[in-house]
Amino acid sequence: MSQKTPLNRSLIQRTVEYHGKPLQKIWESELKPNELYALGIDDGLDFAVYMARQKHFTLQERAKRLKLQQFIVRNANTLYRWYPSASGEPELDYKQSKFCSRKHAACVTVQPGDVVYGTITMFKHFAGVLFKPMFIVGNVTSYVRNKSIKGTIGKNELIVPEQRPSKGYFPNDLICCEVLDVAPDVRRLNCTMKRTPESRAPESITYGLLCKEDMPELYNLSSKRINQSYDHYLENSPSFNDPACIEELFHSVGLNSSEYCTNMSSLKGRYPSQEYAAELRNSQNSKWAFRSVAQGIEHFKEGRHAEAFQCLNKALSMDPRNVEGLVARGALYANSGSFKKAVEDFEAALKLNPSHANARKYMGETLVALGRSYEEENRFEEAKKAYQDCLNIIPHHEEAQNSLEFLKSKPFTGKQIVEPTELELPSRVIPAPLARTVVIRAVIRAAALAALRRPVPVRKFLEMPRDEENYEEKVRRFVAEANKYQKERKQMEDKSKKKKKKDEKKAKKESKKKRKSDEKKKSKKKDKGGDDDVWTKVARMASGA
């Protein structure tokens, strides 16, 4: 680096501390040896800022960081050139104008038909009004409150205020009127409160007595201003913040807004395509999404699944092509039992990065779990497809191979409630209809109890190999399956108990009904027999007589 170009030592030191050791090595390798030492920067460097930033670095941005550091070193003469600084502002000569000329100029710009706002200083019923103009609106808007200009309104040009028609006007009342004539030599405005043909005021402006709230907004802003700098008023003006004014500013200094302008010779020309706004926006989104993914993984590890979902969804909304976010959300879906959504996320991740190891591994395990769930629902064709998809991703997956072979070798004819070997006909004895019904009910009940007692084919815990990477996950799934089977068995037992109680209740009801009908028949027979005895006695008495 040439000694003719002095460099700013403090700026270089802050840059090296911000970008860390990588920038220091590039600087020493591409420039003169001991260049930083000659500037007095080799000792006393504090890399605390770089160490704090290093936590958020990603491998994908390594090439961009290297390009940025090389750009800084190669353009150090332009970026860190030392400029002499001044202790204060440069001396400026301001054009001085006489006070009388300023007052005369204010009267010259006023024309008949302009609107004048002022405050009354004197009112005479026989003469009219004398007032002090404060604000004039016309071709030129002027704030003339501090100018010694007078205004008069003749008696015939006044409008009597409706609020106090008998009293008229009082000093310090605010009024609005129109200019009739201007006398610049004596700095006086002759005005009227009645519209003239030369009036340029809109119909919304009312002449006569005014309230404070009726004064123009621009006047209120001018009267309430405080002693602030010119930059303060400039930055707070509507025109300064209006993007449409940028074009006007370009034209005023002779520049074209469609061209790129710079004082750095190394930046003249076309920019690389990867430095365009769209590419930079994608880079920023990827960086922000990576932070949200890291937060989501931390919540996932701590068991806060709701917070993890929020962080991962936020990351994928910013960068839908974030592979790590898709894999993390897929794992979260898989652990929550949403196997189909998990498979969709893993498939999207593998489309973006087919060699992603975790995505392939997690998708294989999720497909096996999905196949098991299909088996439990007796959806065997879909279970076969899930196992086959797993083998397409991981060809030597042992569990998927065994499950697929088992499904292919087993003929599925539907679930058998009653085993065929349990049905036997009694030899030579043909039961009565009632006995046949009882026998069939007994057989069905025995078959149902046998089905309940029959062990469910569940993979045993001791048969699970202990050297598998996902051993803990399989243990959790085994426990979940056992709990599910126990719950189903309990439900079937409860159902059989309810049915038994219902049958007993029905039998009691039928027995009670039969008993009542028998008692009713007996009472009828008894009544009939009693009537026969009475007639017999009557016949005997008649024959004896």
Image (tube, rainbow, N blue to C red):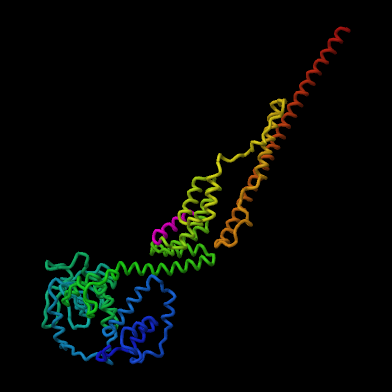
Picture quadrant where residue 157 is located: bottom left
**Residue 135 at x, y = what percent?**
21, 76
Between residues 431 and 134, which one lies in front from this camera angle? 431
Instruction: Report whether 484 appears left or right of 132.
Output: right
Q: Let me know if residue 215 appears in the view.
A: no
- Nearest the eye: 233 or 258: 258
Work out whether residue 299 or residue 534 is closer to the camera in this orientation and state it: 299
Where on the picture, by quarter, is residue 34? Answer: bottom left
Q: Is residue 349 magenta?
A: yes
Question: Where's residue 59, x and y in %?
Answer: 40, 71
- One can see residue 306 in this view: yes
Quadrant placement of the C terminus: top right
Coordinates of residue 198 in the picture (x, y in percent): 12, 68
Considering the whole magenta stretch, tell me its main secondary structure: helix
Q: Residue at point 52% right, 59% down? A: 335
In magenta, the rendered stretch is: 339-353
Q: In the rendered view, would you say 165 is above or below 339?
A: below
Please identify the quadrant where the N terminus is shown. Answer: bottom left
Height in image: 484 above or below 235?
A: above
Q: Position of residue 187 (x, y in %)?
A: 14, 82
Q: Is residue 414 above or below residue 1?
A: above
